[in-house]
Image (cartoon, rainbow, N blue to C red):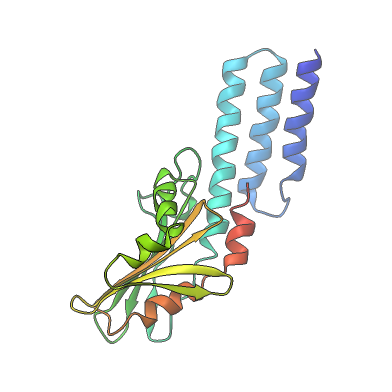
Amino acid sequence: MKNQLRLSGVLLGIALTLPVTVSAWADEVVEQIELGLELYQEEDYGGAITELEFAINDIRKLMSGRIAATFPEAPAGWSADEVASAGGGGAAAMLGGGGTMLEREYLQDDGSGQLEASMMIDNPMVQAMAAMFNNPALVAAQPNTERVRMGRESAIVKWEPNRSQAEVTLLLDGRILMQVKGQNLESQEVAVELMRGWDLAAVREQAAR
């Protein structure tokens, strides 16, 4: 009985802390949580798990949509597509489990330049990149690669002039990997400035655990 009351309090607490103005979608999340609680109290544990998993997935989608809003706007002379999931499904892609990458495409209005901004959160690939960021000698050993300060953060910039390609990578808090890749570029600057336009404070706020 004590465990039942404890779970009831946790679930109701989640429901009450959801923003009441987030749209009907958030209202559905509350309904799913409440139904999950009712099913649990009726000892229909399978049904309760199903409803709560739907609620968790929808909360992740809401979170992903807010993270998508942190992506930088198009630079002057460029156009931007909507933020989408690399695996399809739009900006509402889930960020749980192994994480999902969100990306946004940018096209030069009067040229052939292309940019792609992407973000991965809590993905195993992020840990692999962390080794490079924590090893200055490894960065220095990479051809056409340099470290660029962005406020208090550091980004690794790779520019290949013979291929007109740039790659800017920033690791935030050891778990958020942000990249800007470009091709058909005259220089690395447009890719670097796009990364500088990312609202890092908003990223941290929306991706907080």
Asked whether residue 136 appears in the rendered view, the answer is: yes
Above or below, 127 relative to 5: below
**Position of residue 186 in the picture relative to residue 171 (left or right):** left
List x then y, in percent, for residue 117: 40, 66
Q: Which residue is drawn at 71% across and 46% down?
A: 18
Residue at 79% x, 29% y: name it: 9
Q: Position of residue 62 (x, y in %)?
A: 58, 50
Residue 35 image-quadrant placement: top right
Viewer-side residue, 160 vs 119: 160
Residue that protrudes farthest toward the front in the picture: 137
Compared with 165, 83 (above or below) is above
Q: Quadrant of residue 38?
A: top right
Task: Give coordinates of residue 40: x percent, y percent.
Answer: 68, 18
Q: Quadrant of the N terminus?
A: top right
* Above or below, comparing residue 28 to residue 173 in the picture: above
Asked if residue 74 shows in the view, the reply is no
Residue in the picture at 57% in, 57% down? 66
Q: In this view, does 57 lie to the left or right of 9?
A: left
* Percent x, y of residue 71: 50, 67
Q: How many labels does the image show?
A: 0
Viewer-closest of 178 and 39:
178
- The residue nearer to you, when weighing 199 against 169, is 169
Is 66 on the left-hand or right-hand side of 192?
right
Nearer-the-camera pick, 89 or 156: 156
Q: In this view, which residue lies farthest toward the left?
A: 162
Please say if 58 is above or below 39: below
